[in-house]
């Protein structure tokens, strides 16, 4: 027996795992995987680094609901890491961990429901579990369940005035807003109005940004990332929240009732972006790549890609217009620099926040140059990442089918929806 096979045999959980045999050994295994491997991938995201180390890990040692939740996430992550290997033993192992994760997840939901009825319930525990459940659902690819957990999270955030948890909120607020932005881009117009309402209420409670003040340079790439997430959230509210001047019965406020004046104007969030950009440019002058850690350098490079994408977007006359080809090429260039920097032999990676798959996908659905589209698909295949609800390999397959369908004149450019669920449904209806 090979060394690899022997090691796998020691870890193997019987494929026919049942609730009756689900015991403490597997729970310890899944929690150990979470603490040893999962957290390091989650903490590599732009906004979430401090949260996982400062809150999730300590609570997983002391809180029963969090411990149950991290077991579910550890199992889902372990199955995810094994799924790309094709030998039958590893596939069986991956299936076993998925079964174990589902059992742990169901148990975690039950434990949380009991905890919610406890007079001693802790706000940090509930929100931490909410965030962990979102990550687990992202690994399963169940974006509708992600939406429901985000709705619950923002309901909690908006009800927390009586708690003095400023530091905790500083960490978890940008994380949840970033997840919501990633989800909005994924689902497009199929967004949850309840989630938009919750985010709008959260945004209205934040300290205002004084655009007249130039602001100090950011102290770190992570601080710049948190501030950019706020700009993204302002843009989400602008894009998806109901216009207060339009009537509830569908009447529009501009141009004789045939358009929305708010939608026709320039995005207010553009001014906030330029304010952020000025602070970021000042930070870049002080940033020395040779002295930065790998994680800080990664964040810096991701922010450069984000900046390029935002600049390209704000050139558009209308949000539905195509990007300029030169801008698309520049976005892909920035993305490839990050891919080359992060490639390793650790297999596919799961990250908390979507930083690379969405901008590459954005290029594909916003540029009609087929050569640029195929280059973007190539990068998705090289990436090997699931970023929140965005899976690079799955998106590469979807966009391959999309490009081929358009080339074969099965669909036109105008037929192609921007959001993933509708695009998947459209391609599934074609005879390819």
Image (tube, helix red, strand yellow):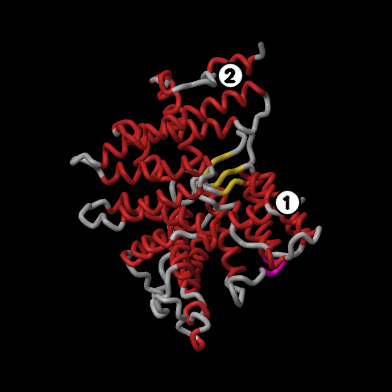
Q: What's the distance in space between the residues labelled 2 and 1, CA to CA?
A: 34 Å
Q: For the point 60% across and 57% down, which residue is it?
A: 422
Q: Residue furthest left?
A: 119
Q: Quick one: quadrant of the N terminus?
A: top right
Q: For the point 50% across and 55% down, which residue is it?
A: 183
> In this figure, which residue is indicated by the disc labeled 1?
400
Left or right for 417, reference 295: right
Q: Which residues are magenta?
A: 323-327
All told, the count of numbered labels is 2
Specify whether residue 325 is painted magenta.
Answer: yes
Q: Which mark is residue 289?
A: none
> In this figure, which residue is indicated by the disc labeled 2?
8
Instruction: Tell me: residue 344, above or below residue 155.
Output: above
Q: Position of residue 397 (x, y in %)?
A: 69, 47
Q: Nearer the viewer, residue 276 or 320?
A: 320
Q: Image quarter for residue 348?
A: top right
Judge whether residue 58 can be spotted in this image.
Answer: no
Instruction: Tell me: residue 143, above or below residue 251.
Output: above
Q: Position of residue 139 (x, y in %)?
A: 52, 40
Main secondary-structure element of the magenta-colored stretch: helix
- SS class of the residue under badge 2? helix
Q: Residue furthest right?
A: 408
């Amino acid at each position: 027996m090979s060394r690899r096979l022997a090691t796998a045999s020691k870890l193997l959980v019987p494929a026919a795992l049942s609730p009756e045999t689900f015991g403490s050994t597997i729970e310890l295994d899944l929690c150990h995987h979470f603490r040893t491997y999962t957290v390091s991938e989650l903490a590599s995201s732009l906004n979430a680094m401090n949260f996982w180390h400062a809150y999730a890990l300590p609570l997983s040692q002391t809180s029963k609901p969090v411990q149950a939740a991290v077991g579910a996430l550890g199992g889902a992550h372990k199955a995810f890491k094994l799924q790309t290997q094709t030998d039958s033993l590893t596939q069986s192992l991956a299936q076993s961990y998925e079964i174990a994760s589902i059992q742990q997840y169901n148990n975690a939901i039950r434990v949380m429901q009991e905890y919610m009825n406890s007079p001693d319930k802790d706000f940090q525990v509930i929100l931490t579990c909410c965030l962990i459940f979102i990550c687990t659902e992202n690994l399963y690819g169940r974006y509708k369940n992600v939406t429901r957990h985000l709705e619950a999270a923002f309901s909690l955030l908006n009800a927390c005035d009586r708690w003095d948890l400023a530091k905790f909120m500083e960490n978890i607020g940008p994380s949840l807003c970033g997840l919501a932005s990633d989800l909005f881009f994924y689902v497009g117009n199929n967004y949850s109005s309840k989630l938009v309402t919750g985010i709008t209420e959260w945004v209205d409670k934040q300290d205002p940004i004084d655009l007249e003040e130039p602001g100090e340079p950011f102290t770190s790439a992570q601080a710049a990332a948190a501030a950019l997430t706020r700009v993204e959230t302002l843009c989400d509210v602008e894009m998806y929240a109901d216009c207060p001047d339009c009537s509830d019965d569908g009447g529009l406020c501009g141009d004789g009732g045939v358009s929305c004046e708010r939608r026709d104007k320039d995005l207010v969030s553009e001014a906030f972006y330029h304010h952020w950009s000025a602070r970021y440019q000042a930070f870049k002058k002080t940033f020395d790549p040779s002295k930065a850690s790998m994680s800080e350098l990664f964040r810096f490079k991701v922010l450069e890609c984000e900046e390029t994408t935002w600049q390209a977007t704000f050139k558009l006359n209308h949000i539905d217009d195509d990007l300029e080809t030169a801008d698309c090429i520049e976005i892909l260039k920035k993305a490839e620099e990050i891919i080359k920097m992060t490639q390793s032999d650790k297999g596919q990676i799961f990250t908390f926040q979507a930083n690379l798959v969405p901008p590459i996908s954005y290029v594909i659905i916003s540029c009609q140059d087929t050569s640029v589209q195929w280059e973007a698909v190539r990068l998705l295949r090289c990436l090997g990442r699931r970023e929140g609800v965005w899976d690079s390999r799955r998106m590469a397959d979807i966009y391959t089918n999309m490009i081929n369908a358009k080339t074969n004149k099965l669909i036109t450019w105008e037929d192609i929806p921007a959001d993933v669920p509708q695009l998947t449904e459209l391609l599934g209806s074609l005879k390819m």
